[in-house]
Amino acid sequence: MHEYIRGRGLLEAMVRSSRIIPDRTLIPADAYRAIVKKNVEFVRLDALDPVRNPRTTAVMVVPYPPGIPIMMGGEELNEKTLPIVQYLLARQDFEHRFPGYAGDIHGIDRSEPDQDGKQYYEMMLVKR
């Protein structure tokens, strides 16, 4: 497991993702209003294309460890935040490779298990 983490550069990816200051498209209060008005949708992280199709997060995303927000509600997933998406996908891949060792990421939900028992990360995004 430790070899996998080192080999995939997960710690370095975590540090890279924590140094990004995402662009804000909504203030957090407006992102929350989108939730209250049910103007949000859950989208699988591996289905996003933040470079060609930027999207706005509805909630804060906080991976544990370290427990520091890497995105706030109202910030945009775009080319600038690609390292964040890649880090989260690497965490998802880790969970697929090592079942039972799932981490906690506030703001990330897991899909229902597929036929192979795998769950995929989903984010709550503001509908367009």
Image (cartoon, rainbow, N blue to C red):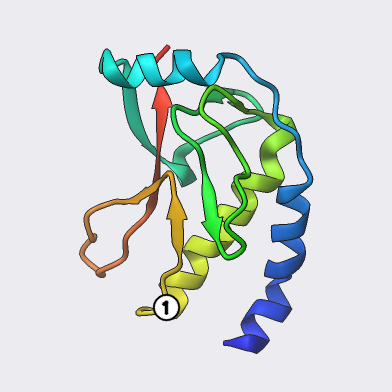
Tell me if 23 is positioned left or right of 74 in this view: right
Residue carrying label 1: 101
Picture quarter with the N terminus: bottom right
Quarter holding the C terminus? top left
Is 71 left, or right, of 18 in this rendering?
A: left
Where residue 83 sits in the image (x, y, percent)? 70, 47
Going by the image, does 126 lie left or right of 74?
A: left
Where in the figure is residue 54, as x and y percent of width and height?
A: 59, 23
Judge the density around disc 1: few (<14), some (14-19), many (≥20) Cα neighbours within 10 Å: few
Q: Position of residue 122 (x, y in %)?
A: 38, 44
Total numbered badges shown on the rendered structure: 1
Q: Nearer the viewer, residue 104 or 126?
A: 104
Q: Is residue 33 above or below residue 14?
A: above
Q: Residue at x 63, y 87 (%)?
A: 2
Q: Position of residue 46 (x, y in %)?
A: 48, 46
Q: Residue at position x 35%, y 79% from top? A: 100
Amino acid type at mark 1 = Tyr
Residue drawn at 44 percent across, 27 percent down? 58
Residue at the (45%, 33%) spot, across then down: 59
Is 110 above or below relative to 29?
A: below
With respect to residue 108, does 117 lie above or below?
A: below
Q: Quadrant of residue 8?
A: bottom right
Q: Is 118 placed left or right of 30 in the picture?
A: left
